[in-house]
Amino acid sequence: MSEPVNTTPSGKSDLLKQLRIDRQETPRSKFTPMQLMLAGLAGSVLIGGLWWLFASGKTFTVQTAIAQSLAATQGTTTVLEATGYVTARRQATVSSKVTGRVAEVLIEEGQHVKADQVLARLDATDSRAQLELARAQLNVAKAQLADLQLLLDQAERDAARQQDLVERHLVSQQAADDARTLVASRRSRLNAQEQEVKVADRNVELAQVGLNNTVIRAPFAGVITVKAAQPGEMVSPISAGGGFTRTGIGTIVDMDSLEIEVEVNESYIGRVQAEQPVQSTLNAYPNWKIPGKVIAIIPAADRSKATVKVRISIESNGDSRIVPDMGVRVAFMENTTANSNANKKPIPGVLIPANAIRVQGDKNIVFVVNDERAHARQVTLGQTYADLRQVLNGLQANEKVIIKPPADLTDGARVQAQ
């Protein structure tokens, strides 16, 4: 039998106390502090391992360059840098020598033309008519000359007969004198007509020149850079018509005459000399180094800008990548080999592109490619040579470095060189 339940007030109170939950009592942990610390450390290692596994699986596509030994490049150093433009020494806006309407244009931009090649033709109706008129006048003058020649011959025969009659006392001396006077007159007219024939002949030549002037030819071999006129437009060697008349057919440039023109601050012009070697870099092709030399220093300064113009040759003239008005950066070099002596020590270190260096705090980092992995190297930097930088320590010659390393590139990351 079950025990009877105590229903008294004191009994009910004891039962309620047994059922009440004590919220102030803290449950005890099943793990010790050392166990919790070890578990956190294991979790950190696991997260780091997963991150390394994910990062190592990503492949970066990069551009690389070879570290060059300064012992091989010793002999030239940059003494000055300047900017300028590619210019053409031989460039012409081709126009006609006469005013006329364009009948035909035979050129297009980028077309290569030879010297004396026909570029365009003007309407030659008037010039051709002038030539025909001059030829007709020449024929008339020649016919008159032939007629006068016949009259002179007749007068000379008459004069001879009159003289014979005078000697036989058959006519008076007056008749013989009149005959000689007629001969002299007709000879004079003949001489004048001969000059008229020469004038008519010169008029034919002049009309022929006028007709030839309607054909516009290339003054030299080159490339057409501008096509300025179309058939039906008026062209003139001088500006006329309030802007409605063209002054040229097109512009031709001799690509073999390209050179570089830079402006050097007059404070540094003393560093530039004739025949000085230079290294030029086109803005369009920053990785292409073009050798050259100083042609001349223009003996005049720009007062407003305090600069002096310098002309520089291009050894790669004829390359289709070089076109007029391109921006260019020029490094003036100084040959140190000629000024060195036998006891001069070689310059230490290697040269790499300046954009291969990443600055992290107070450290200079370079990523070296080895076994398709990027390995971070801390390097010690030296002097600057144009867009190259000297590395004194941390790199060896012929090692492959990454140019413009990505911001998220890390040590040991997988890379693929372009």
Image (cartoon, rainbow, N blue to C red):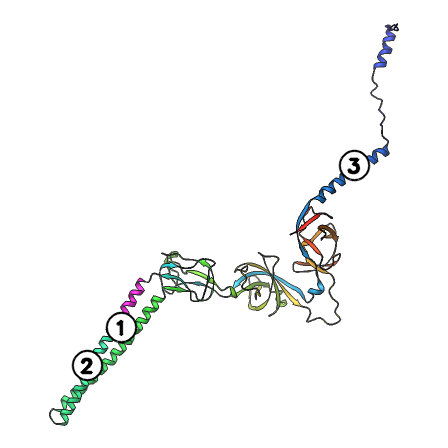
Check contact, mark 3 vs mark 1: CB within 8 A.
no
Report which residue position mark 3 lands on. 43
Which label number is shown at residue 151?
2
Front residue of this view, candidates 277 and 310: 277
> Is residue 312 in view?
no
> Which type of secondary structure does the marked residue at label 2 adopt?
helix
The verdict on residue 29 being magenta is no
First along the sequence among labels 3 and 1: 3
Separation of residues labelled 2 and 3 (CA atoms): 132 Å
Q: Are marks 2 and 3 in contact (CB under 8 Å)?
A: no
Q: Residue furthest front?
A: 371
Neighbour class for label 1 at 10 Å: few (<14), some, many (≥20)? many
Count neighbours of disc 3 (C-alpha within 10 A) and say few if under 14, some if 14 to 19, many if 20 or more. few
Q: Which residues are magenta?
A: 123-140
The residue wearing badge 1 is 138
Label 3 or label 1, whichever lies nearer to me, is: 3
Distance in Å between CA atoms under marks 3 and 1 = 113 Å
Q: Amino acid at mark 3?
A: Gly
Residue 128 appears in the figure: yes
